[in-house]
Amino acid sequence: MTESNGAKLNLAGLGIVPEELTEDNYETWKNCLKNYLVGNGLWGVVSGKDTEPGKKNKQELEEWKKKSKQEHEEWKEKHKQEHEKWKKKNALALHAIQLSCGPAMYSKFEQAHISAEYAWNHLVERAWGRGQGRKPAPILDHDEESSVEDNGSREHVEYKGLYELIEKGNWHDTLDFLQQNPLAKSKKVSSHGDTALHIATLSGHIRIAEKLVEMMDPKDLEQINEYGATALTLAAICGATKLAKAMVQKNENLVTIANPDHKDGQLPVIVAALYGQKKMVRYLYEVTPKDELSPEKG
């Protein structure tokens, strides 16, 4: 028995997945792992529905300012207990994901230890990027650690409805929402700074993403999420070349936007190479100014 086979038997014994994640067993692996997480009450922290306790939106911040010192202490104690419960669930979910995908795959994600949701989302992206045109399962809003005082960063909750419509692939109602709320197409709709275009791209709803590109102002396409990624970066990860071309045709500057502090924030052509998207690499290399790829640029 090889070490690899032994690992697979151990995983099966744990009852999480029948074998570690590979490029050939993604759908089965995902369904087995999700069933395990749901059955053990851990899916909420992975999907983002159970957000890390302690965050306050603008209205809650105003109410916070009116509270007495004693009320502040009571609130902190209450949320400290809730936060400990959330941390435990997050750790259990992370452990299950790590066991299921194996150390080789898990080690590719530098921030995976922070959030089970981050690990899940990036495994989905990675698996889709490697799988010959496979459409991924919808990716839900991702939340990672943040301080209790996050100064109202949850303004995205105003656009929760838009997020859910896009995640479900419902273009008809998405269009209706945008017609009633024309500014929403350029707003942040997730806790990590994703726009509607980010979510459509990540969720694999490329036709919706193309429609959004048509509607958006060129400058709005330059928005990055908290992982340093523009929507073009995510298209590069997914191998959506037609979508990438539409974005670049509307704003040529997108191919030069980089945030090297994050793996997914590097130049789009570099990100495409990291995720093995050969066709995307060829296209982006053609349209990226060569001085951006010089050694002096890092």
Image: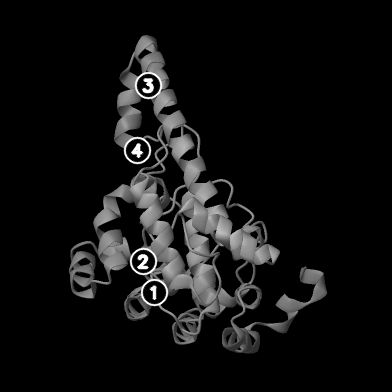
Tally of marks: 4
Q: Quadrant of the N terminus?
A: bottom right
Q: Residue furthest front?
A: 1
Quadrant of residue 167 within the rendered picture: bottom left
Q: Point out residue 154 in the picture as x, y percentages from the top left corner.
A: 37, 44
Q: Quadrant of the C terminus?
A: bottom right
Element assignment for label 4: loop
Q: Point out residue 228 in the picture as x, y percentages from the top left corner.
A: 56, 60
- Looking at marks 4 and 1 on the same chain, the residue that comes earlier in the sequence is marked by 4
Q: Amino acid at mark 3?
A: Lys
The residue mark sitting in front, 4 or 3, is 3
Q: Amino acid at mark 2?
A: Pro
Q: Which residue is mark 1?
A: 204
Q: Amino acid at mark 4?
A: Asn
Q: Which residue is mark 4?
A: 57
- Looking at marks 2 and 3 on the same chain, the residue that comes earlier in the sequence is marked by 3
Towards the viewer: 235 or 5 = 5
Q: Which residue is mark 3?
A: 78
**Looking at the image, is 146 positioned above or below residue 134?**
above
The residue mark sitting in front, 4 or 1, is 1
Res 224 visible: no
Q: Are marks 1 and 2 in contact (CB under 8 Å)?
A: yes
Q: Which residue is mark 2?
A: 138
Element assignment for label 2: loop
